[in-house]
Image: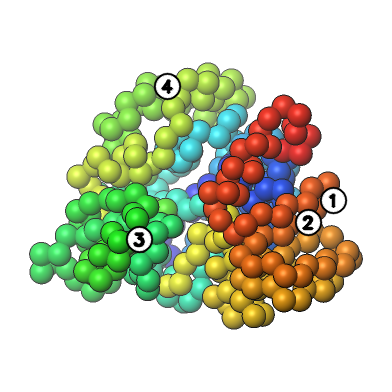
Amino acid sequence: MNNHNYCVIMAGGIGSRFWPVSREERPKQFLSLTPDGKSFLRLAFDRFSRIVPADHILVVSQTRYHDLVAETVPEIPADNIILEPYSRNTAPCIALATYTLLKRDPDAVMVATPADHMIQDEDIFDETIRKALDYAASSDALITLGIVPDRPDTNFGYIQGVQDGTEEAGKPIKVKTFTEKPDKALAEVFFQSGGFFWNSGIFVWKACTIRDELARHMPEVDILFRGWETELGTPGQAAFLERAYSSISKISIDYAVMEKTDKAWVYPSKFRWHDIGSWESLFSFISSLGRETDGNVTLAGLSLCRENKDTLVYSSDRGKLIAVRGLENFIVVDTDDVLLVCPRDEQKAKEVIANVAMPEYEKFR
């Protein structure tokens, strides 16, 4: 095992699309929403601890979630919990993790991953990550794991690889284009033509390479984090980050770097991957496990569900009886203080959640 390999788990979001279960005080990465009973962060840690030592796993989250991270993954050292004062999307998060690693190990090679993925085919996943780390260690490639699609899905971004006859099995392919979530017709074209991959949001690269590309393509990061060499890991770190984060833009690493750099590569990956970002994606994941009944997914201790179709029912109180009848394509989510009943339509769910931002509903956020 290369002792310069690290994993960075990004776990600072608030998981608003899983409202009302995911709340600002305890967002989805710390919750168990799947049948295995483990939180997303715990699953991510367990997954990568098979590949790198526990003391080489860093978790980046918000300051207010420090205790939740420590409670969820007590195995990692305290200084591997990296705290942002505010959530500013993945580019600032990855910048902070990169600078932290470089101060510890100038030869660091890192995997950066969201906390909210579900991975099947663990052996294939482990082998893919190890090969990607080995490739990155010997090159200046910025690698995204690209999932080989099995359907024309419109919920994911797509990456097109260069198909010039030089591709080698088990190695990354130079990126040609990135495309945000396409419409149905374009997704069908991508799927049928081959050479396109779902953008997993899992990245592999040398820390020094992503540092240089951040400075080149997002110079504000380089400016606002100036002095990181002396400030990070000291008592002055919190004040230093407060100044930096108060001015930095909210931007993803895809927009900030990957779509601009000439060092972007995609690693074709064949493990089964699920990005659990919403109730709809959770429904799809549970359905893929074959645990639905009549097209319905029920995550409740006691349920009396009849004549429903393609409906998700969830209750956080496993001692409460949940009775639902005659719904089609609905989401029913019951918590101590909120009952959500909404069509299984992501746009309509977003509209409900947006309304919760109004002042009179503050205690429910």
Return the disc, 1 or 3, that comes first in the chain's sequence. Answer: 3
Which residue lies under the disc numbered 1? Answer: 336
Kindly indicate the quadrant of the structure image that contains residue 237. top right
Q: What's the residue at 55%, 68% (across, down)? A: 284
Q: Position of residue 130 (x, y in %)?
A: 39, 66
Instruction: Tell me: 69 left or right of 289.
Output: right
Which residue lies under the disc numbered 2? Answer: 334
Q: Position of residue 8 (x, y in %)?
A: 50, 49
Q: CA distance from mark 4 to mark 3?
A: 40 Å
Relative height, residue 252 to residue 228 (above, below): below
Return the disc, 4 or 3, that comes first in the chain's sequence. Answer: 3
Q: CA distance from mark 1 to mark 3?
A: 38 Å
Nearer to us in this view, 147 or 169: 147
Which residue lies under the disc numbered 4? Answer: 224
Return the disc, 2 or 3, that comes first in the chain's sequence. Answer: 3
Which residue lies under the disc numbered 3? Answer: 184
